[in-house]
Image (cartoon, rainbow, N blue to C red):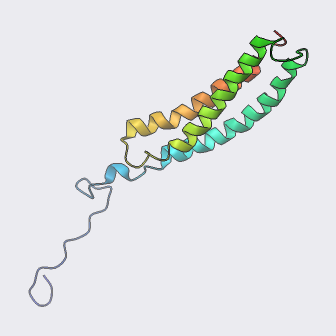
Amino acid sequence: MSQFGAPGQPPMRPAHIPGGTPRDDRRYWWVPATVSTGLSILGLMVCFAAMVLSAFATDSCNGRDTCPRTYGHLDIAEMLVLFGVLAMVGQWVPAYWSPWVVRIGLAILPIVLIIAAVAMFLTTPAGS
């Protein structure tokens, strides 16, 4: 009670105590996306190095029509990088409103795509 006999403010409950604020599930919404973005940027650095090295596989080719397997392999790897970057940026849009399972899935997707792109760049068939 206050000094005038009226009921006082109810005590504030910390967010980590059960029965706290109704948005406890969104307390750390940014963690999966932040970790994923950091790991994806590191993976993109490795991917860039692998992409530069994979260009040596086209040295014996005179054009796209002489080495269709090599260029097809590189095209798929470049698309994986593109989709990885789009997934890395796009995961931030639904991160706050989606449940934890979706957040974790969206956080894993860009990392998997970029790892697959690195593997594709490193296994490019030379001149075939």
Q: Position of residue 43 (x, y in %)?
A: 68, 35
Residue found 32% across the figure and 52% down from its top: 24
Does residue 119 appear in this view? no
Q: Position of residue 65 (x, y in %)?
A: 81, 13
Q: Position of residue 4 (x, y in %)?
A: 11, 90
Q: Position of residue 34 (x, y in %)?
A: 54, 47
Q: Is 21 on the left-hand or right-hand side of 107?
A: left
Residue found 57% across the figure and 34% down from its top: 110
Residue found 62% across the figure and 40% down from its top: 39
Q: Quadrant of residue 75?
A: top right
- On-image quarter of the N terminus: bottom left
Q: Which one is in front, 72 or 114?
A: 72
Q: Quadrant of residue 69?
A: top right
Q: Is 25 on the left-hand or right-hand side of 5?
A: right
The relative height of residue 10 versus residue 60 in the rendered view (above or below) is below
The relative height of residue 3 versus residue 125 in the rendered view (above or below) is below
Q: Is 56 on the left-hand or right-hand side of 95?
A: right
Q: Which one is in front, 116 or 68?
A: 68
Number of residue marks: 0
Q: Which one is in front, 81 or 25?
A: 81
Q: Quadrant of residue 9?
A: bottom left
Task: Name the residue furthest top.
Answer: 128
Task: Name the residue furthest bottom.
Answer: 4
Task: Name the residue furthest front.
Answer: 65
Task: Name the residue furthest left.
Answer: 5
Residue found 40% across the figure and 36% down from its top: 102
The relative height of residue 21 versus residue 114 in the rendered view (above or below) is below
Q: Is 25 on the left-hand or right-hand side of 128?
A: left
